[in-house]
Image: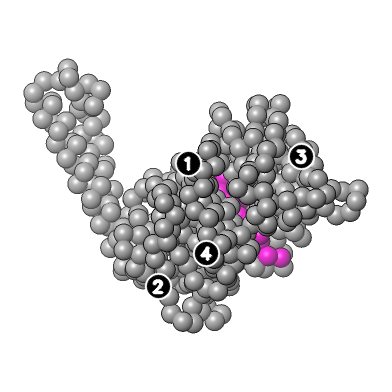
Amino acid sequence: MEAGGIVSCGSWIKRPEKVNMVVLGKSRRALSSPAVLEIFSFDPNTTTFSTSPLVTYVFEESDGDPVTIAVNPSGDDFVCSTTSGGCKLFEVYGREENVKLLAKKIAPLLDAGPQKCLAFSVDGSRFAAGGMDGHLRILHWPSLRIILDEPNAHKSFGDMDFSLDSEYLASTSTDGSAKIWKTEDGVPLTFLSRNSDENIELCRFSKDGTKPFLFCTVKKGAKVVIAVYDISTWNKIGHKRLLRKPASTMSISLDGKYLAMGSKDGDITVVDLKKMEICHVSKRLHLGTCIQSLEFCPSERVVLTTSKEWGAVVTKLNVPADWKGLSCSCASLSLSLLSHTHTKHTCLSLKVPHCSVSETFLFFLCRVADLLVASWTIFGISYCILHIF
């Protein structure tokens, strides 16, 4: 489904009771059409959002146009960067049928200028803004306490992402370099390794809780690969060529199972991270136009993409709705056996005090087996990646 207009940015808003909404930033077209933020309802059954916005916020002329949006994982607020008005905070109130927006100023970002990248940490406790001027700011949220204010972080920002535990921030520069920052104190930790003829462009941390990796798109001439870095050492452990064209934006699903990339000529490609294989392609989704933003829906196998030419598009992916596979068959078999054991013996954690000695011992063995399966799973993932690459 498409929504016309000069859409400059967009994102999902996760609300209570599994409700998802879409927020779009639209640039001004003429004096009679000012820059606005609009929030739409989303229907997962039809994979469409409403034709009319639930609420609209009109920017002042001095604010300029919206550039990029980052939504707090709580869904209670979001930040929007503008071309000339710094960043604004918008608090979201009410239910879907009566949603309201309250705009507020963010003191540390009032005169920040246009930001290329905005990001909240997974737990919502930190917020980062990477400027087109290369200035990096990391704030504690919601206190707005400044953790880092670094004017010379990069030449100009390309991309950024927080790790699952919110401990690290990865950022890329238009000069092809990439840095890792500790978010607790803002200390620059390291540069990611690359060859002199390689440019690291986009970055996303794994989000499934088992694979401690950082995925980056790396461009070398006309060739683009996905490189994988081990975040315990920050060493590159392999790469694979899955794209035949440069990517303009990247997103990872909240459960960490899929990685999506938008191209500079309007295609999207989705990768199954278990297999490191392409599982979905939508060609000419934004025909001949660079995809500016791409984001997975918080609870559906749907992505939101935006471009200035074609507006906003929501696309249902041809992937399983609920994906529970593991990365090696032996782990899957072990889990099946454990599932049978747990079904037969319901001596789970809440019932242990009332179990017999033999049942308690069986419960202990099951817990040990769970740990062994988890270890085998991590080993299997690492083994698969090393052999794929």
Label 3, on which residue?
A: 57
Label 1, on which residue?
A: 125
Q: Is residue 267 above or below residue 13?
A: below
Could you classify mark 2 by the number of other residues whose Cα lies within 10 Å: few (under 14), some (14-19), or many (20 or more)? Answer: some
Give the Cα distance between marks 2 and 4. 17 Å
Label 2, on which residue?
A: 193
Q: State the image quarter where residue 234 is shown.
A: bottom left
Q: Which residue: 47% across, 41% down?
A: 125
Q: In front: mark 1 or mark 4?
A: 4
The mark nearer the N terminus, 3 or 4, is: 3
Q: At label 4, which amino acid type do we have? A: Ala
Q: In front: mark 3 or mark 4?
A: 4
Secondary structure under tag 4 reads: loop
For the C terminus, give its image quadrant.
bottom left
Q: At label 2, which amino acid type do we have? A: Ser
**For residue 127: magenta?**
no
- Is 324 or 20 nearer to us in this picture? 20
Indicate the position of residue 106 as horizontal and vertical percent values: 63, 43
The mark nearer the N terminus, 1 or 3, is: 3
Magenta region, residue range: 289-304
Give the Cα distance between marks 3 and 4. 32 Å
Q: Is residue 321 above or below residue 294?
A: above
- Is 233 or 137 nearer to us in this picture? 137
